Amino acid sequence: YERLLRRGILQRCTALIDPFRLGYSIYRTFLRLENKRKKVRELWRTLAAHSHVYWLAECHGSCDLMFSMLATTPREFSDRQSSILSRFNSAIVSYDVRTISDFKAFSKKHLTQECGSVREVGQGTQAYQTNDVEDHILRELARDSRTELEELSQRIGVRTATIRSRIERLLKS
């Protein structure tokens, strides 16, 4: 893992959250882009900063950029995607959208050639309803999954024991 970061193959890793359990669907968009570097960089920054973009990758081959966006309905996705892509029409040659119904998540150990766990995400999962505190915890952990419980407690304004119990409950669900 560290070697892949140093070589620039990976830029960062974050904690995996099962969006299906939170009531979201995943929509993956494949973009073929014009060679307009400034516009493409602006598109990348826009997507990277968007709160509902779940995953983002630069590619070389049949597409130039892929991203996955979370939405609770196809209409919500369409509105979000249109609001972004319409600003970059001059750089987009074509695009294709697919709905992701499940995927396999591999542990970090797979990157270090050790035998790691594989987790099925999405298949037959029941949506878990989060509350405001749990939503705040998930947002903070999505920013930095290594944040200590005490720091989370201060940022969110609840006791450390509450943070611990909510994280345990989220993990069990």
Image: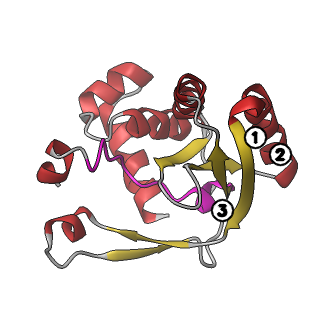
Q: Point out the tag, 1 or 3, that comes first from the N-terminus.
A: 1
* Image location (x, y in percent) of residue 26: 65, 57
Vertical side of 91 occupied by 156: above or below = above
CA gap, disc 1 and disc 3 = 24 Å
Q: In which quarter of the image is the N terminus?
A: bottom left
Q: In this view, does 30 lie above or below 151?
A: below
Mark 2–mark 1 Cα distance, whole angstroms, equals 5 Å
Q: Nearer the viewer, residue 149 or 22?
A: 22
Percent position of residue 11, x then y: 30, 42
Q: Mark 1: few, some, or many residues within 10 Å (few <14, many ≥20)?
A: some
Q: In this view, does 67 lie above or below 105?
A: above
Q: Is residue 139 left or right of residue 51?
A: left
Q: Give the range drawn in magenta.
A: 9-25
Please name the residue shown 21% across and 65% down the image: 111
Q: Residue 78 carries which label?
A: 2
The residue carrying pointer 3 sits among few (fewer than 14), some (14 to 19) or many (20 or more) residues within 10 Å by Cα, namely some
- Comparing 160 with 138, the one in front is 138
What number is the disc on residue 81? Answer: 1
Looking at the rendered structure, the kind of residue marked 2 is Ser
The disc at residue 32 is: none
In magenta stretch: residue 20: yes
Q: Is residue 29 magenta?
A: no
Q: Tell me which label, 2 or 3, sits earlier in the chain.
A: 2
Q: Name the residue under label 3.
A: 127
